[in-house]
Image (cartoon, rainbow, N blue to C red):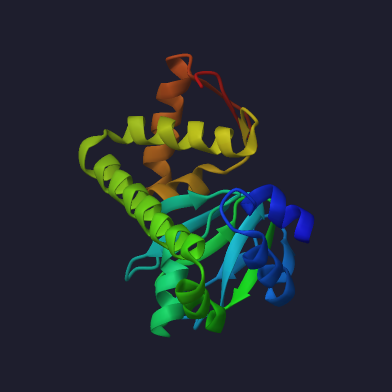
Amino acid sequence: MIQELKENYGHLFEATLLEEINQVGTFKEIPEGFVMIDIGNYLKSMPLLISGAIKILREDNDGDELLLYFLEKGDTCAMTLTCCLGETKSEIRAIAETDAKLIMIPIQKMEEWSAKYKSWRNFVFKSYHNRLNEMLETIDNIAFLKMDERLLKYLNEKARLTNDNIVHNTHQEIAYELHTSRVVISRLLKKLENLGKIELHRNFIIIKDI
């Protein structure tokens, strides 16, 4: 685990902190689609992502989901940090977008390291800043982009995360994450196909305009 820590976080943390993470952290491999954190959970540890991608979702009163942002290697989740430090229930759902590897850090170490290591404090503050910017971008997309623009941006982001121009989500799954109906998504996907930006197939979508 120490080698993966050095490769992903060696430029951020000093050797002594990396060694502490190696000693107290728990290495986990998460399969695609696995629900890591659900709404209402109490959290006892925070993740450091080594590889893969994790999507962070919110849920409304009707049970419909909205995609907030993706986490990639070298990231952690500001929502998780907030819940851990405040000992409050999670207000987000975290699902592995791809197979992922991560290290879970015990909650009690977070405050200790914030006082002990400047690099850890900077990492936490930067994580808050990055996640806030991503949520603001999500709000801007909802407020200012047309749904077809949001859909194409969503598909391109999916392709970038997996380094593959084939997206294997159903129309219904896309509708859930963009907080709209399957009928709307199906209509807009057909429109994008007519514009030559994608190719629709029975169980997958090929992105041509990346």
- Residue at the spot x=43%, y=85% of the render? 87
Residue furthest toward the left? 143
Position of 82 relative to 131 (above/below): below
Number of on-image labels: 0
- Residue at the spot x=33%, y=54% of the render? 132
In screen coordinates, is 137 left or right of 31?
Answer: left
Identify which residue, 56 or 43, lies in the foreground: 43
The image quarter in which residue 33 lies: bottom right
Identify which residue, 181 or 27, lies in the foreground: 27
Query: In which quadrant will I find the N terminus?
Result: bottom right
Position of 118 relative to 159 (above/below): below
Q: Position of residue 45 (x, y in %)?
A: 57, 77
Q: Position of residue 171 (x, y in %)?
A: 51, 42
In screen coordinates, is 96 left or right of 146?
Answer: right
Could one spot residue 65 in this view of the protein?
Answer: no
The image quarter in which residue 166 lies: top right
Q: Position of residue 134 (x, y in %)?
A: 36, 48
- Residue at the spot x=52%, y=54% of the render? 55
Q: Position of residue 140 (x, y in %)?
A: 25, 42
- Residue at the spot x=65%, y=51% of the render? 10
Could one spot residue 25 in this view of the protein?
Answer: yes
Identify which residue, 135 or 31, lies in the foreground: 135
Position of 59 relative to 173 (above/below): below
In screen coordinates, is 43 left or right of 90?
Answer: right
